[in-house]
Amino acid sequence: MDKFRMMFQFLQSNQESFMNGICGIMALASAQMYSAFEFSCPCMPEYNYTYGIGLLIIPPIWFFLLGFVLNNNVSVLAEEWRRPTGRRTKDPTILRYMFCSITQRSLIAPAVWVSVTLMDGKSFLCAFSINLDIDRFGNSSLVKGMSETEKIKLLARIPCKDLFEHQELRVAASRYIKCISQACGWMFLLMMTFTAFLIRAIRPCFTQAAFLKTKYWSHYIDIERKLFDETCKEHAKSFAKVCIHQYFENISGEMQNFHHRRSSRDGSDDEGEDKKSDEEKLLGIRAQNDMNKVLWNWHTCKPELALRKDQIDGINNGKLNGNINGAVNGFAKGHTHEVEKKEWAVYYSKV
């Protein structure tokens, strides 16, 4: 259980690596699904094209949407896009950067599926077998005397090995269409690779400062949401502890006091420290309505991204003045605050 917890914490702290791993797993899953998929062309002129093209288009769309579903940044993007402006303005470039980052990762698995499908050529053969010209293969005697409808029905049965009688013609037509399909597959891979190269090469040509700005604030939005969720969890945990403790004190106060008298006093001191720490974690919010107002204000009016230096300096100066005053008072009384004052009691006997 500890190993799974450590792995989960590692994935949470390295979300970018985690999402890259998810994209790689989805790409391998798409290739594995295609290899395990049983291709069955209907071999009918009305459905061949729809089945072949649908197999080439619909699964990539599903993988693309699945990539958006598995990406945690989609909810962050939607929340940042739909939130009220309030004191914090919304930057469209940050939203655009986050959307492009999500889209790039989601396109990996669909690209793998399209590449594998085109390299295999079965869907291409099923979709375009009715467009073949049999005269190119030197066997025009098969279609002599046939009407156009019968000729299309004959060509539609080429992908089906059991339904087409002339195997030599079927093998030649299949190789011809698969050759075109593989050429389209290599062109697709070349286009995707060239596009990725252009994105990598053109990005430094633009203002690097603008790119760093959008990247920084997109990371900030993600980290801010995580820290806010963690703070809410800690507050809810402390709130529940204090609420339950107060409930038991009110309901069974006498029994609890009796139990505390008979128990060790060291344990009571530890419990007092724990209770004090839980009280501090409440941050002054001790009612349900107050917490609802805090959450509502966080959604409707997030704080401005401008930290005031005077408050931080005031806090630091207050701490520093307190330490200095404590030291001066300590020296004035004859001892420092770091040295504990010892009291001696002397008893005299007249015996």
Image (cartoon, helix red, strand yellow):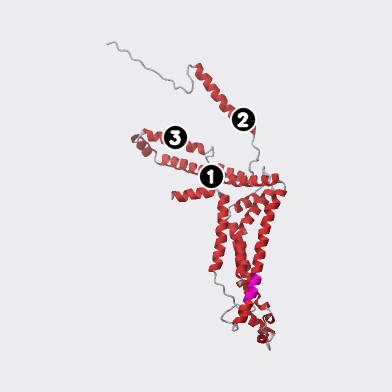
Q: Would you say the residues marked 3 and 1 are in contact, meaning their CB atoms lie under 8 Å apart?
A: no
Q: Is residue 219 above or below residue 312?
A: below
Q: Amino acid at mark 3?
A: Glu
Which x, y percent locates residue 139? 66, 84
Residue that appears at 47% across and 18% down: 335
Q: Quadrant of residue 105?
A: bottom right
Which x, y percent locates residue 206? 72, 48
Q: Between residues 241 and 70, which one lies in front from this camera angle?
A: 70
Label 1 – label 2 distance at C-alpha: 27 Å
Dot 2: few (<14), some (14–19), or many (≥20) neighbours within 10 Å?
Answer: few
Label located before the other in sequence (2 or 3): 3
Question: What is the magenta range?
Answer: 174-181
Q: Quadrant of residue 217?
A: top right
9 lies left or right of 136: left
Q: Amino acid at mark 2?
A: Asp
Element under disc 1: helix
- Residue pointed to by mark 1: 230
